[in-house]
Image: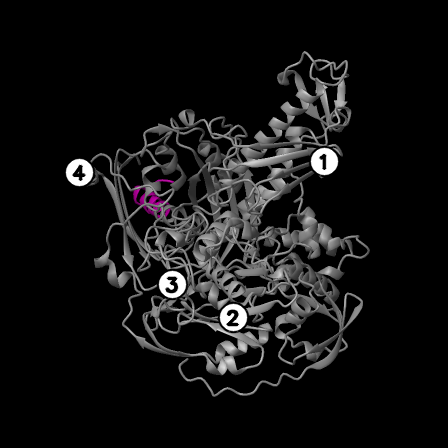
Amino acid sequence: MNNETSYIGQPVNRVDGYAKVTGDAKYAADYNAGGLCYGVVVSAGIARGRIVRIDASAALQLEGVFQVFTHENVSGLAWFNMSYKDMDAPPGKHFRYLQTDMVTYSQQPVALVVAETFELARYAATLVNITYAADAHTTSLTGNLDKARPPKGKKTGFKKPANRGHFEKAFKAAQVTTDVTYYQGAEHHNPMEMHATTVLYYKNGSITVYDKTQGVLNTQSYVKSVFGLSGKKVKVLSPFVGGAFGSALRPQYQLFMAVLAALELKRSVKVMLTRQQMFSFGFRPITQQSLSLGALEDGSLQAISHKAISGTSQFEDYVENIVNWSGMLYHCKNVQQDYKLVSLDTYTPLDMRAPGAVTGVFGLECAMDELAYKLHMDPLELRRINYSVEDGSMKKPYSSKALMDCYEQAAARFGWSKRNPRPGSMKNGHLLTGWGMATGMWDAMTVPARAKATFTADGKLTVGSATADIGTGTYTIMTQIAAETLGLPIDHVTFQLGDASLPFAYLEGGSATAASVGTAVQQACLQIRERLLSLAKDIPDSPFRELSIEQITFADGKMYMSETPANFIHLKDILTLTATDAVNVTSTPLPNIFKQMKYAKNTHSAVFVEVQVDEELGSVKVSRVVSAVAAGRILNPKTARSQIVGGIVWGISGALYEESVMDHQFGRFINHNYAEYHIPVNLDINDIEVIFVEENDDVVNPLGVKGVGEIGQVGVAAAVANAIYHATGKRIRDLPITLDKLL
Amino acid sequence: MDQVAAPVLVDQATHTITLTINKIPYELKIQPWVTLLDAIREYVQLTGTKKGCDQGQCGACTVLVNGKRINSCLTLAVMKDGADITTIEGVAEDGILHPLQQAFIDHDAFQCGYCTPGQICSAIGLLNEGKARTKEDIQELMSGNLCRCGAYTNIVAAVQQVKDKL
């Protein structure tokens, strides 16, 4: 027994790597069909008001233009609000495209032009003449803080802020306090792939929808309920997604547009949004947050207050967990939290990588740095002093928490002990070097997921679940889990996803997929093992007859007697010898809720950042990052490292570059392109080191996996801001920290 | 926004051009307003080349024209009549990956994969140019290709490995 089929925890190359480097990987806009036509969306030019007249006659005159869909000619769609609700919809009245003359936000899609070619549709779209009656709009959060109100309704995963102890009293009694306010503008996900949907239309009225989505079942149920179609008529496929980061959690309007046009025109249709239109739907909400921390002179936290006000739309209440982290991350008896919303004339915000935590932990970890300086204490020491072994908000112990190891390993690797705390102490010519650190925290969630597995007589295993791979490595890690569990060479295993006909999986997001779908895949393969043993017992003179599954080892494509490995049978021979074509199973794992309920389940990180600030130019370079992550078992250190590195790049980006700038005169995000909405380019990103700290956890799931998609980003922006303070002595409390703020 | 010019008749006349893409000549009857990117994707149906912004800001559409890397979204197809074009589909030869393709896989130089065809074509163009000497040169000269997943450090490692072997 060589056991060469041990893959979990190995740095296996992506199984879809070949497809991605050769152009074979097909994304939503890469499909074609005979007679395919193209849709181009017309976006509203005002932020609030009414469409008085919409004149599409000039567009329609052009030969090759098939139709211009507007609110004047779209009808017969679902009536109830419920029909427009999707798996990630916040509470409210969900938006209905092309069904009203009212304009509720700038860039609202108000027409779809469909033509024979993309170029013609794009030209015809410029000929659609719209007359608006504009109303005054409200797009400023800071100008409307007096209208802040508690959120209405519930959203999956949202935890209501909770108070404990007596904040006011404890804050007054504290020896050292900080009281600060931070501001973050909107950010748009901007995956490289612009949202696209290709709908292939068949003569029998059925459609195949290639959609950019983080959940094919979400897409399918939306199309079914909005257009009144049966599931049999709507096939949804999304094998490759060109990044999403949350943007494809909700069905975006290119889906609605493409399906509408295909059904109405009885033709295949492709709709891809423009880069400008990538700023016309969900985004990380504009937020202002206030933190008040009170401590004794020994650094022990006595009181924490965290209050946040975010923007939402006029029709839905988007909520996220911004303030909650302040009740969890540190040991503190007196905590006060408040979270309110202001309705603005924008589209509804949307979950964007580590939603809530990226914002809230930024505030908390900057405030902790400010407190450390007031205490004349090392910022890392302040975290150590206030370390919490339980989640104080729920009074539950953590299922595992190796954050102290993160602090120690990352600090040692970074060389933190050599830090001179004085701001501006590391100066070389006009370059100021600064070192900052912060803590990160995210949830280790499990969501419902099922998987099916088929083992065939040729020795091949196919496993599938209706989940997604948005670049996270789902294909690869699921293949690893399946191959190891059944003891097969990895190239004998195929994992399928992004197909609505596969068994149920919840949306791919929140770092929950590895744990949730991974458990379903593992369980499906364990069921196959049972079935194979049972079949093997039917073989004449089977040496396995008296054995239970615990006495068997699956490895190297064989089934061994664990005690006497000289006795084995090739897995495919079991099927051949029993005249079985295939073994099929579907798993529905049920988490041990009673065990899990006793614990808080989270991932943690410690991130250390070095910046170089040009004193004369105000430009900032992040020259070095060390991040230590405690996220349970790491299934694949290669793809997991990429996830963390990507998160760190996002953190740097949020700290220094990204902001969707609202022009309040027009109520519009004005920098709506890649030239003016800055994200890091290659030269902006330097040394990044990732350490995975060992963390064993048998509570979260049998694999011990916690997920790594979000944790890499949380805390990074705070570490950058704290490093900039260390370099310059300037506290910049609104992101991004652009050079003008440092001059 | 409100003032739209009166409709003009569109010159729908097509031009016959030849593009040699990945060593195969394609004769296309094409209108002058079709970009090289859309010609490759929608008319020749080689969809490996990606559209990430359609305005020359992201590099996802990078292809090699006569060995030089360009943003195919900023070029009209009719301007490249007779040109020799390599797209990501033509980088591997006879099923054997180009060293850069293998290096991208080995270094995990991508996540979602959407910018990857452009990154690889751009890196080939960069190596053809022979200007990159240091790691910083590679970073600077690859900065026209955005990667939202943030795989830059791995992209640099992949390019550097291949460059060092040349």
What's the chain of the residue with tag 3?
Answer: A
Q: Which residue is mark 4?
A: A169
Quarter occupied by residue A144? bottom left
Q: Residues within 10 Å of mark 3 (few under 14, many from 20)?
A: some
Q: Nearer the viewer, residue A200 or A1?
A: A200
Task: Report the amino acid beneath label 4.
Answer: Lys
Q: Which residue is label 2 attached to?
A: A40
Under mark 3, the amino acid is Lys
> Viewer-nearest of labels 1 and 3?
1
Label 2 element class: strand
Q: Chain of mark 1?
A: A
Circle 3 residue: A741
Compare residues A527 and A614 and report the one nearer the observer: A527
Left/right of residue A315 with respect to residue B125 in the rendered view: left
Q: Kindly identify the amino acid type of the residue bearing the numbered disc 2.
A: Val
Q: Position of residue B12 (x, y in %)?
A: 63, 83
- In the image, are marks 1 and 3 on the same chain? yes
Q: What residue sits 67% from the left and 18% below the top?
A: A552
Question: Which quadrant of the view contains residue A691?
Answer: top right
Host chain of mark 4 = A
- Tell me the CA gap for discs 4 and 2: 59 Å
**Callout 4 environment at 10 Å: few (<14), some (14 to 19), or many (20+)?**
few
* SS category of the residue bearing label 1: loop
Residue that extends furthest to the front in the rendered view of this protein: A204
Numbered range of the magenta stretch: A364-378
Q: Earlier in the sequence, mark 1 or mark 3?
A: 1
Q: Is residue A403 left or right of residue B110?
A: left
Contact flag, marks 4 and 2 (Cβ < 8 Å): no
